[in-house]
Image: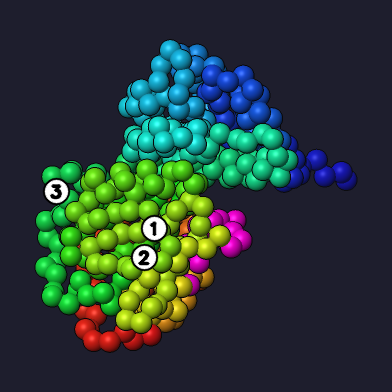
Amino acid sequence: MLNTAVSPLGASSRPRKIRALIVDDSALIRRLLTEIINSQKDMEAVGAAPDPIAAREMIRALNPDVLTLDVEMPKMDGLDFLEKLMRLRPMPVVMVSTLTERGSDITLRALELGAVDFVSKPKMDIANTMAEYTLEITDKIRAAAAAKLKQTPRVAATDRVAEGLPALSNRIASTEKLIIIGASTGGTEAIKEVLIRLPPDSPGILVTQHMPEGFTKSFADRLNKLCRIAVKEADDGERVLPGHAYIAPGHSHLLLRRSGANYMTQLSQSAPVNRHRPSVDVLFHSAAECAGRNAVGVILTGMGKDGAHGMREMHEAGAYTFAQDEHTCVVFGMPREAVAAGGVDEILPLGDIARKVLVRLNSIGSGSIRV
């Protein structure tokens, strides 16, 4: 007798495609993004709007899963539209930004307003660049489709050091102690939520956030205005000082190095690791080698697995390590991989990380560097 049951591999069991709506005033960019999205088996471009006014009607009619949104457009600014969208009809948004100082500032503001991530405008003159761009934007659309939109609690500028943080011992600001942080998707806001809570006599902090060249300086400058610690884009060969945070520049890996009794920064333009430069794994590996148990490692929200092996190396070298929990992550990928690799000592909500880092640093004994 013939089996008339529907095959589990039939069309009815195919996973639903991610439905993306493109909003950009450039016809060329709209066409390019449509082709890129439609080239993927798991997503489709359901429409392309030339401005936010048209996009508003298309969102109502098409109900997309993800929006790609140009930063600067006619009729309504991208930020104004994003702010209204996140208030009235929250949905995952990936910003498409120009590589300019103005573009980077606007993009960082968009992330504060609730955009999941951003990509720069594509460079269409080199074939291999387009291949890399296709991987980047489609990965970010996938991450956005799965991202949590719930906003984490914001720290007011007048409350930079949260009540209830432990008092710092005299030894905590020693040049021997370090805080090492890595993040990706959702990380700009998560990093801010950690750094804004740290007092001015915190140990030196090294940070790698996946971000392209041209955006990291604006990111560091923005944090420097909000935080009680000094925040800057890292230069090559500078001494790591207490009360300072050093952000990996978008063009280079950031590494920790020793010079006598001092910690120093090192920038490297060696090959990308896990498709990233800067790479969290590169920073964590160097911290394991140079700082050992005198470092505290933190891995925050992000897609992929960058940082997982490096955090395990830090853990094995004696560093105490924290991962942001799934509930407060925009994307739990990087913390999940770090936990699976066996390199995480504690999993915490984002709002608890700064306090627990300070508690741990208070427990690290003074004395010479122990690796």
The residue that disc 3 covers is 159
Q: Are marks 1 and 2 in contact (CB under 8 Å)?
A: yes
Secondary structure mostly seen in the magenta stretch:
loop
Q: Secondary structure at mark 1?
A: loop
Q: Residues within 10 Å of mark 3 (few under 14, many from 20)?
A: few
Specify the quadrant that holds the C terminus: bottom left
Q: Position of residue 300 (x, y in %)?
A: 39, 57
What residue do we see at 21% from left, 84% from top?
A: 366
What residue do we see at 82% from left, 44% from top?
A: 3
Q: Reading the chain from its start, which is encountered first: label 3 or label 1? A: 3
Q: Position of residue 179 (x, y in %)?
A: 32, 67
Q: Which residues are magenta?
A: 270-285
Specify the quadrant that holds the N terminus: top right
- Relative placement, left or right, of 171 versus 26 is left
Q: Are marks 3 and 1 in contact (CB under 8 Å)?
A: no
Q: Secondary structure at mark 2?
A: loop
Q: Which mark is residue 234?
A: 1
Tell me how far mark 1 sits from mark 2, CA to CA. 8 Å
Residue 277 painted magenta: yes
What residue do we see at 54% from left, 19% from top?
A: 25
Residue type, mark 3 in image: Asp
Tell me how far mark 3 sits from mark 2, CA to CA. 30 Å
Q: Which of the two marks, 1 or 2, is nearer to us in this view?
A: 2
Q: Quadrant of residue 263?
A: bottom left
Residue 349 painted magenta: no
Q: Position of residue 175 (x, y in %)?
A: 26, 74
Residue type, mark 2 in image: Glu
Q: Which mark is residue 301?
A: none
Residue type, mark 1 in image: Ala
Q: Which mark is residue 238?
A: 2
- Relative placement, left or right, of 235 versus 310 is left
